Amino acid sequence: MKAKNKPRNIPLSQNKTEYSEPIRPQKKRVLPNGYRDSAVFRFLPFFIYATILGVLYIGNTFYTEKKYTEIESLKSKVDQLRIDYRTLKYDYLNMAKRSKIDGKVRKNGLYPTNTSPVIIEVDKD
């Protein structure tokens, strides 16, 4: 095994200058200097931003497709209800014709008159 801690203080006799530099504590780094400056770490915020945008885009696509299928199913229901409305309207208008009314009332013993209606006047005395 290599020794991790090498002595920093060199005696003055071996030092080329007359004084030695003081020992400074080194900061422990998580990653070496070479990794910190690599392209991966420089573009990491962009990658995170692009990933978030991608997730939002995919979620929006699913939401849009869901709403589109709901709209299409509601359109088919509206078309069916429109057909039902027109059928009922035609039936009601057809039942209100005079010939249809005459046929139904004859079953109860009522017949249409051939004379015009008479106005009845009442004296106010």
Image: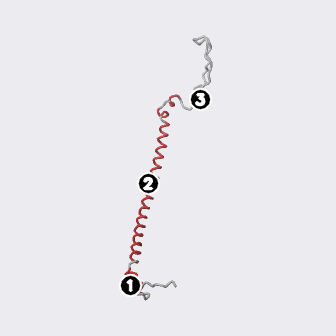
What separation in Å lies between label 3 and label 2 (alpha carbons)? 51 Å
Q: Percent from the top left, x then y, of residue 89?
A: 41, 72
Query: In the figure, is residue 9 to the left or right of 111?
Result: right
Circles 3 and 2: CB atoms closer than 8 Å: no
What separation in Å lies between label 3 and label 1 (alpha carbons)? 115 Å
Q: Residues within 10 Å of mark 3 (few under 14, many from 20)?
A: few
Q: Is residue 58 above or below residue 87?
A: above
Q: Percent from the top left, x then y, of residue 55?
A: 48, 46
Outermost residue to the front:
125
What number is the disc on residue 11? none
What separation in Å lies between label 2 and label 1 (alpha carbons)? 67 Å
Q: Amino acid at mark 1?
A: Ser
Q: Percent from the top left, x then y, of residue 54?
A: 46, 44
Quadrant housing the N terminus: top right
Residue at 45% of width from left, 56% of height from top?
67
Q: Secondary structure at mark 3?
A: loop
Residue on which disc 3 sits: 28
> Which badge, 2 or 1, comes first in the chain's sequence?
2
> Which badge, 3 or 2, comes first in the chain's sequence?
3
> Which badge, 3 or 1, comes first in the chain's sequence?
3
Q: Secondary structure at mark 1?
A: loop
Looking at the rendered image, the disc whose residue lies closer to the viewer, 3 or 1, is 1
Residue on which disc 2 sits: 65
Q: Amino acid at mark 2?
A: Glu
Q: Percent from the top left, x then y, of residue 8?
A: 61, 19
Residue at 44% of width from left, 87% of height from top?
108
Residue on which disc 1 sits: 116
- How many numbered circles does the render carry? 3
Q: Secondary structure at mark 2?
A: helix
Q: Amino acid at mark 3?
A: Lys
